[in-house]
Amino acid sequence: MKSGTKPRILLLTTGGTITMVTDPEKGLVPCSAADSIIQRIPEIAQLAEMDFLPLANTDSSNILPSLWPEIAKALYERWNDYDGFVVTHGTDTLSYTAAAISFMIQETDKPVVFTGSQVPLEETGSDGRANLINAFRVAISDLAEPVVVFGSLIIKATRAKKTSAFDLQAFTSANVPPLGTIGLSIRLEPNRRVRSRRKPLFQPFLNESVAMIPVYPGMNPDIITFLAEKHSGIVLEGYGAGNIPTEGRSLVPVIQRTVESGVPIVICTQCLFGSTEMELYQVGRAALDAGAIPAIDMTPETTFAKLMWVLGQTNDLKTVESLMQKSFLGELHEGG
Ligand code: ASP
């Protein structure tokens, strides 16, 4: 950042509640004048010189993975023109997008800050104003990695999980402490990645053909056969430490067949916190022996986005396994 001048921040918008308005017939809908809603927040102009890039304007439930490389490309093409980036996004799928962008632009030397809100900026009691201002404060800080800023937390983007459909603190940092907290001031973890001169790695790989499904009592194994016919990879949210049914409606034979046919199956935990530990129980080992890949302590959202990114580079099962279990940006505890 040049001293004496205001930092330059690019605000990339994609829609979401933060810029929605209420339509009496349809409920909350994207507002066509999203930029004018945001420009009514004077603090932003005090903090930074902002440019506005509306890339999409949709409820994030409608966002397709094909938007992820577009966002990554838009950021990367403008990388040298700005001191930081803020991306507004609906909260429903924010974790998926934030994780995908983290894999697509690595070795970052400045922050990419994802934010949104539970209540629209236009409504009384909105958390959007504070979230947006805080996102800009973090975007001009010395942090240099993709993060989610929401409520009082600054969360590594690959660790952010929407855990409340109601609370204004909608996101939690899964399995690692937050990178910072926002209270009377902004406190950042000493071990954070900080700004330095380096060139980011642009790797917009994506194979969108990944399915994700939780294991549930009585699950019909044919569902996995069906998914495997239509997809290049599957994320299975196992129970607890990565366990699956192995008696009655056992999933073991279908996992084995699917993996042998060249379609990787990655098992994460459907618990909010914790890690796969698939050696622990007979019902976890059986999945391992059938060829499933443990996701360790990655969230389902990050496991899903990462598998798309990995399969965008290779179909070789051994390489898929080693890339899925490698920590690129602290998204998992290696060997954990
Ligand atoms: N349905 C909204 C969305 O994800 C929810 C939100 O933004 O809070 O776009």
Image (cartoon, grey):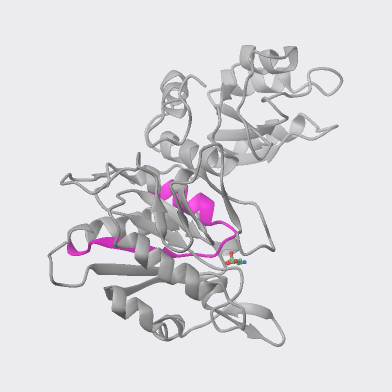
For residue 31, above or below residue 325: below
Q: Residue at x 64, y 78 (%)?
A: 28
Q: Nearer the viewer, residue 20 or 84?
A: 84
Left or right: 139 in relation to 160: left
Quadrant of the frame with the N terminus: bottom left
For residue 284, above or below residue 265: above
Q: Quadrant of residue 290?
A: top right
Q: Nearer the viewer, residue 20 or 164?
A: 164
Q: Residue at x 68, y 60 (%)?
A: 165
Instruction: Pinpoint residue 223: horizontal percent, then vertical percent.
Output: 73, 35
For residue 13, above or below residue 144: below
Left or right: 86 in relation to 227: left
Q: Nearer the viewer, residue 47 or 313?
A: 47
Q: Quadrant of residue 259?
A: top right
Instruction: Pinpoint residue 233: horizontal percent, then vertical percent.
Output: 55, 33
Q: Residue at x 67, y 25 (%)?
A: 242
Instruction: Pinpoint residue 22: horizontal percent, then vertical percent.
Output: 64, 84
**Res. 209 in view:** no
**Res. 194 in view:** yes
Q: Residue at x 52, y 57 (%)?
A: 94
The segment highlighted magenta reads: 81-101
For residue 311, above or below residue 156: above
Q: Nearer the viewer, residue 274 or 33?
A: 274
Q: Quadrant of residue 59?
A: bottom right
Q: Quarter of the picture for ligand 1? A: bottom right
Residue farthest to the front?
184
Q: Is residue 213 magenta?
A: no
